[in-house]
Amino acid sequence: MAAERTARFRALTPTQAAELAERTRYRVIGSLLVLLGIAATILFARNIDPSLVSTFGMNTGGASAAIQLPDLVLPSFLTVVAVSGLSVLLGAFQLLRGFGKWSSAVLGAGILLFVFSFLVWATRDQSINLASMLKSTLQRATPIAIGALAGVLAERAGVVNIAIEGLMLASALVAVIVASLGHNIWLGLSAAVLTGALLALFHGILSIRYRVDQIISGMVINIFAAGMTSFISAKFLEPFQFLNQPGTFPNLSLPVLSSIPFFGGVIFENNLFVFAMLVLVVAVQIALFHTRWGLRTRIVGEHPKAADTLGIDVYRMRYLAVILSGICAGFAGAYFTLGSVGRFDRLMTSGRGFISLAAMIFGNWTPTGAFGASLIFGFADSLQGKLAILNVPIASSFLLMAPYIATMIALAGLVGRATPPAADGQPYEKQ
């Protein structure tokens, strides 16, 4: 039977095969939405006393300039039932009629509904500050999003930059030392960006000029950065603490915008890195898809020979993209020290560079998509910290699996096929 189905599938034209795969994906999305709704009912609703309520704080607290809102108080049982029912209805409509091109967005909405059901269950007869959690999500997603932009810039030009983790780590160390010695965090930030650019240039020389395998080249930088930063930290930063006291960028409050209820405190009261990340996402999106430079970069990553025929310097475009990638990675690395804890600790990036690459793939090699994926990682990181306070009977480390499971689902094609640039990772040799 299986062999017969395989034979029938092979007899289909490419167009018919694509349509069949798309219909199957739509059915899977609909079924998953229904299952999420049923699972939320079984796991959460049946364990809630109907008399309990869930309280969500709508203000970030502190000296926030945002207009204060009253707490959102919801009946726990009824809210979970209503949200679960909505997920089932969305799934049923998807199975019967379909949402067409909006199917992936509806799946995302279904996942958010499931997460909201979980939050309502977790806060039954308790409270959680929703505004603070979302602000923490944005902050924790910042280095991942900027690192993902680094990956997008390089890979759109056809160069795999798996060295983002090493670039972040090295830049974080250099930022601390320079800022501490110069007593100027702006000087430290500039040094971090320069470090990322120089290491990326080294990666570019190996992979573009000498056509070294790009994965190997990137891993060499990662291993070098991990070893060198650990050595310098143990040999110099730990015994000489004055080298590890750079200070941090203060939080900024944007006039007018910071007074917006709820969103003012979440988005518009943050430090330099968060604001820069939001600007970079928009800027890179526009640059890649709405400028001549972006068009040439994408052509180089898709069809370098055709680009060369048109008179585009493939090598120069790739070098430029890799250096810009390094600048972004260096900026992301500086976040860990100058934008967060104000000191350097060994291996403090904790794999965020690799998570950035996962976010890039999840986002289908687009800046806005990578930003959305970064928020998933940031939310999981923020949520697992909040659950410890709520004494939820779930191991907090279990939640850290969620972003990776979501990434595997994306790579499997459930939320849309992740398609890298055609010449990604392929060295180009001018004929």
Image (cartoon, helix red, strand yellow):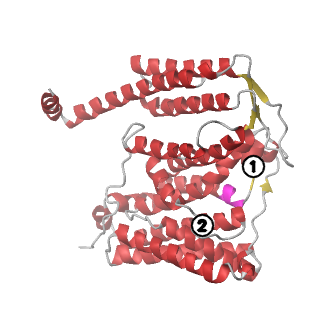
In the image, residue 329 sits, relative to residue 126, either above or below, namely: below
Q: Position of residue 169 (x, y in %)?
A: 56, 69
Q: Position of residue 279 (x, y in %)?
A: 63, 55
Q: Which residues are magenta?
A: 272-276
Q: Secondary structure at mark 2?
A: helix
Quick one: label 1, few (<14), some, or many (20+) residues within 10 Å? Answer: many
Q: Which residue is mark 2?
A: 333
Quick one: label 2, few (<14), some, or many (20+) residues within 10 Å? Answer: many
Q: Is residue 291 visible?
A: no
Q: Nearer the viewer, residue 59 or 209?
A: 59
Q: Which amino acid, by three-letter code, is at mark 1?
A: Phe
Q: Residue at x 12, y 28 (%)?
A: 4
Q: Residue at x 74, y 44 (%)?
A: 132
Choose the circle earlier in sequence order: 1 or 2: 1
In the image, residue 96 sits, relative to residue 39, either above or below, namely: above
Q: Which residue is mark 1?
A: 268
